[in-house]
Image: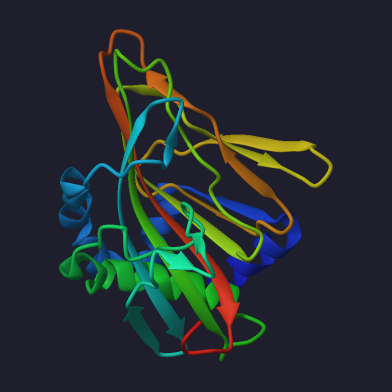
Amino acid sequence: MPGQLAQELDEHGFVRMSGARMRGLLGAGPLSEWSRLRASWELLPIEEGIAANGGSARRRGAVFLIGQNFIWRRTPRSQSQDGERLRFPSEIGTGVAPMAADATSGALINALLQLARTTFSVADAASLWHVAMHQLRVETGPDRTSTSLRALHRQAHERIVVLAVKRSGIAGGMAQLVAPGGIRIAALSLGRPLEALILDPRRVRLGITPIHPRKGALAGHWDILLMTFRKTTEWNS
């Protein structure tokens, strides 16, 4: 199955996965933790500076090194590196609230990371990947007509996975996929739990349209799990 995903990613630069397909790949055992993991979005702290248009967003983060037969959660780097503040969400710095240990050490997160690793490492099974994982809630309400996330990735990233967790009371939040030269490839909605988007940002640019309250709703939010991947040869990268 990861081989088929890798082929689709190689052909198109992105893969949109239905919730049913993701469930089939993850398996019943890891998915037994889904309700508990989803509930952890209710505990995210507000983080300044990651939402645009005067809106608000909540985040926790974690950093991993993953390879063949292992997943290692790492200590985040300092919030400043080479004199420049790490900006959302290119990396996770020490200023980002950490994801709960019981969430990141569970079978579900491990299954997600291993699925990504095996998909991205079909041609090189022994490759190492640095992963930044962002547990995000983007919020909108009557005092904010729209809220959007700032830039989702940087050039150094080689793969991105966006996993839908929950949408409540919102419209918008479309994933805009753009090819080099500005040609729009697709506009995708990630609204149902476990729907996912996998892409190669070197070939396809990703942007997320602003969210706003759905008609009749006073407030709303969008919960996602965002993971960025870059290949590394160093244990301290």
* Of residues 68 and 150, the one drawn nearer to the viewer in this rendering: 150
User: Which residue of the protein is positioned furthest toward the top in this rendering?
Assistant: 216
* Of residues 24 and 206, the one drawn nearer to the viewer in this rendering: 206
Looking at the image, residue 191 sits to the left or right of residue 121; the answer is: left
Give the total of numbered labels.
0
- Where in the figure is residue 25, as x and y percent of width and height? 42, 65
Q: Residue at coordinates 38% horizontally, 88% vertically from top-left?
A: 70
Q: Residue at coordinates 36% horizontally, 82% vertically from top-left?
A: 71
Q: In the picture shown, does residue 219 fall above or below 99?
A: above
Q: Residue at coordinates 36% horizontally, 66% vertically from top-left?
A: 26
Looking at the image, residue 168 sits to the left or right of residue 13; the answer is: left
* Of residues 38 and 47, the one drawn nearer to the viewer in this rendering: 47
Q: In the picture shown, does residue 237 fall above or below 84?
A: below
Q: In the picture shown, does residue 177 fall above or below 225?
A: above
Looking at the image, residue 234 sits to the left or right of residue 57; the answer is: right
User: Which residue of the protein is positioned furthest toward the right in this rendering?
Assistant: 181
- Where in the figure is residue 163, as x and y percent of width and height? 42, 51
- Where in the figure is residue 39, as x and y percent of width and height? 16, 48
Looking at the image, residue 139 sits to the left or right of residue 128; the answer is: left
Q: In the picture shown, does residue 156 fall above or below 226?
A: below
- Where in the figure is residue 123, as x and y percent of width and height? 67, 83
